[in-house]
Image (spheres, rainbow, N blue to C red):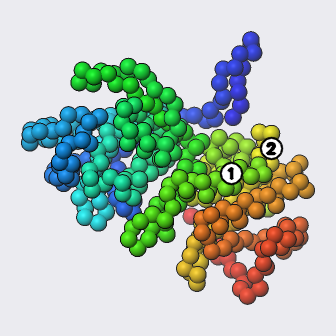
């Protein structure tokens, strides 16, 4: 990504590589551990959702969204609108254990061409409020939006809505400001607060949310051991020390180049397209942890951790499969800093251990690993089963 200028030297904007737009949202089920999100159906979800929402006896939870439905016709009309609408595109939040719809949510102001999508029309019943399922529902919507290729994920609310104003930053959104006198609702002025989460911020936010949602973060009574903010701070340990931080999608051009260099080091031909696609998938899907070392805006090295489990210890671990330093930055301690950051991150996540493998003749790397406390395995042989590509 680089800034483009016109012939007068005026900055025009940063390039967006290979932008083809995002995928329009689909009516699909998003499966979680505490809840699932299903395309809203009045027949399937209406009765359960109404029963859950009517547990709010005094109606205070309706203050900022819409007047509370009063009659059977009101509820039916509202549910009918939810089922028929495509923007907003509504989902029922279904409790995984009971199968009851206990809330609803939607994507709205959907703009695939520009890569912008908003989350809104949130109706959390008393059965859903302040539960792990409530956070998981927001995580599932975020993850799917970025998987569909959106660059900007928005949250907007009435600036007087204190619970919503607190929820957005907790979930990782950045406050952007208040649009004054944005609307007139029921004869009342509404100032609208704007929040956003960008694709470049998603990998770090995803890691924090997944750490919070992990089963190990809850005790036998279902009480959290660490708050979402504590998980975020723990993961940030490696992002502010010695130039090492978690990679984001904004790093993709430079990081893909380093990854291609790593593959060439192990005998692969130069294949920039494959390297770019592979790293992009890891960053978007969040199925690996990538740490980068940055100096003066340039990435000089990276390491990549792949989650796994150790059955004997019955605990999570990670495979440190990639460690690479740009040739111009070698012998400057970059590899050592990346390994130290990986160790700190592993401790912060409660991993049982880190594992790696290296070539027999890679003596330089072996010396580095052993100097930092890594122990050579002598009790087990490693085997590999190559599989033919079909």
Element under disc 2: strand
Q: What residue sits 26% from the left and 50% below the top? A: 125
Which of the 4 quarters of the picture holds residue 320?
Answer: bottom right
Q: Is residue 388 visible?
A: no
Which of the 4 quarters of the picture holds residue 32?
Answer: bottom left
- Compared to residue 285, the image places residue 321 above or below, namely below
Residue 123, horizontal then vertical, whole percent: 29, 44
Q: What residue sits 79% from the left and 62% below the top? A: 266
Residue 234, horizontal then vertical, whole percent: 61, 58
Residue 29, horizontal then vertical, whole percent: 34, 53
Q: What residue sits 62% from the left and 74% below the top? A: 352
Identify the image quadrant of the N terminus. Answer: top right
Name of the residue lying farthest toward the bottom: 379
- Compared to residue 226, the image places residue 189 above or below, namely above
Task: Name the mark on residue 295.
Answer: 2
Name of the residue lying farthest toward the left: 72
Q: Label 2, label 1: how many angstroms apart (C-alpha)?
A: 13 Å
Would you name the residue on which mark 1 appears?
Answer: 239
Q: Is residue 348 left or right of residue 5?
A: left
Residue 382, horizontal then vertical, whole percent: 70, 80
**Could you tell me if the residues under marks 2 and 1 are in contact, i.e. CB atoms within 8 Å?**
no
Q: Nearer the viewer, residue 67 or 257?
A: 67
Which badge, 2 or 1, comes first in the chain's sequence? 1
Q: Residues within 10 Å of mark 1 (few under 14, many from 20)?
A: many
């Amino acid at each position: 990504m680089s800034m483009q200028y016109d012939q007068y030297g005026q900055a025009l904007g940063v390039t967006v590589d290979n932008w083809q737009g995002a995928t329009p949202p689909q009516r699909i089920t998003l499966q979680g551990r505490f809840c699932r999100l299903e395309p809203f159906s009045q027949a399937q979800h209406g009765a359960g959702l109404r029963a859950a929402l009517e547990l709010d006896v005094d109606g205070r939870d309706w203050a900022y969204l819409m007047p509370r439905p009063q009659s059977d016709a009101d509820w039916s009309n509202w549910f009918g609108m939810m089922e028929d609408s495509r923007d907003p595109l509504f989902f029922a939040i279904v409790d995984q254990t009971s199968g009851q719809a206990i809330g609803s949510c939607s994507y709205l102001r959907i703009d695939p061409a520009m890569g912008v999508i908003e989350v809104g029309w949130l109706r959390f019943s008393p059965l859903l409020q302040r539960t792990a399922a409530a956070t998981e529902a927001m995580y599932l919507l975020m993850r799917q939006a970025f998987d569909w290729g959106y660059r900007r994920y928005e949250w907007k609310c009435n600036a007087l809505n204190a619970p919503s104003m607190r929820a957005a930053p907790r979930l990782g959104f950045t406050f952007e400001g208040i649009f004054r006198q944005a609307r007139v609702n029921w004869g009342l002025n509404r100032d609208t607060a704007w929040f956003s989460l960008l694709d470049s911020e998603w990998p770090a936010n995803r890691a924090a949310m997944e750490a919070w949602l992990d089963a190990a973060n809850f005790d036998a009574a279902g009480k959290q051991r660490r708050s979402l903010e504590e998980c975020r701070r723990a993961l940030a340990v490696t992002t502010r020390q010695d130039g090492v931080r978690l990679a984001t999608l904004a790093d993709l051009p430079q990081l893909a180049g380093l990854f291609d260099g790593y593959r060439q080091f192990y005998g692969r031909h130069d294949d920039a397209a494959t390297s770019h696609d592979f790293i992009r998938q890891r960053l978007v899907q969040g199925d690996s942890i990538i740490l980068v070392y940055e100096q003066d805006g340039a990435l000089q090295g990276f390491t990549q951790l792949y989650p796994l489990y150790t059955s004997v210890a019955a605990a999570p671990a990670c495979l440190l499969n990639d460690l690479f330093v740009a040739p111009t930055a070698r012998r400057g301690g970059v590899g050592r800093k990346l390994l130290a950051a990986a160790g700190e991150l592993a401790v912060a996540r409660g991993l049982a251990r880190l594992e790696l493998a290296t070539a027999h003749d890679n003596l330089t790397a072996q010396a580095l690993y052993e100097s930092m406390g890594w122990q050579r395995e002598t009790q087990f042989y490693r085997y590999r089963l190559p599989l033919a590509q079909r």
